[in-house]
Image (spheres, helix red, strand yellow):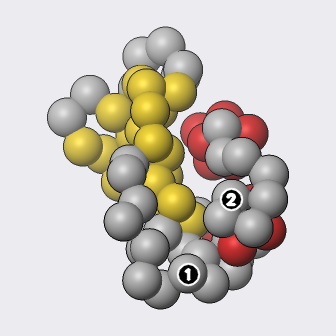
Amino acid sequence: MKVREIAWNGIDEGEFGKESVTIDWRKANVEVEDDNYKVIFSTTHVTLGPNIVYVDIETMEIEGLAPRY
């Protein structure tokens, strides 16, 4: 749950950020990729794709967000 909260706080407010998320942030999908958690928030912007936040497994700090096109 903590990694979801950290990732949620790393997403900007606004139309393309938190306002576009279609799920409760507490139910975001979490995967492990390399040395990071990959937290995936589905959005209303199908063509841009989901908001994806990478959180370091050891430090629990945000490493970055995936680009959205």
Viewport quadrant of the C terminus:
bottom left
Viewer-nearest residue: 21 or 67: 67
Q: Identify the mark nearer the N-term, 1 or 2.
A: 2
Which residue is pictured at 26% across the width and 28% down the height?
35
> On the rendered structure, is 21 left or right of 48?
right
CA separation, marks 1 and 2? 10 Å
Q: Position of residue 2 (x, y in %)?
A: 67, 38
Amino acid under label 1? His
The residue nearer to you, when weighing 41 against 16, is 16
Residue type at the position of mark 2:
Gly
State left or right for residue 58 relative to residue 43. left
Secondary structure under badge 1?
Answer: loop
Is residue 44 left or right of 15 when viewed as pictured? left
* SS category of the residue bearing label 2: loop
Residue 22 image offset from top left, x and y in percent: 69, 80
Which numbered dot is residue 45? 1
Quarter of the rendering containing residue 61: top right
Q: Nearer the viewer, residue 69 or 17?
A: 69
Label tally: 2
Where residue 39 appears, as percent x and y from the top left, is 48, 52
Q: Position of residue 21 (x, y in %)?
A: 68, 71
User: Residue at the location (55% across, 81% down)?
Assistant: 45
Q: Is residue 51 above or below residue 1?
A: below
Disc 2: which residue: 17
The residue drawn where x is 47% and y is 86% is 46
Is residue 10 visible in this depiction of the protein? yes
Label 1 crowd bin: few (<14), some (14–19), many (20+), radius 10 Å: some
Q: Which mark is residue 35?
A: none
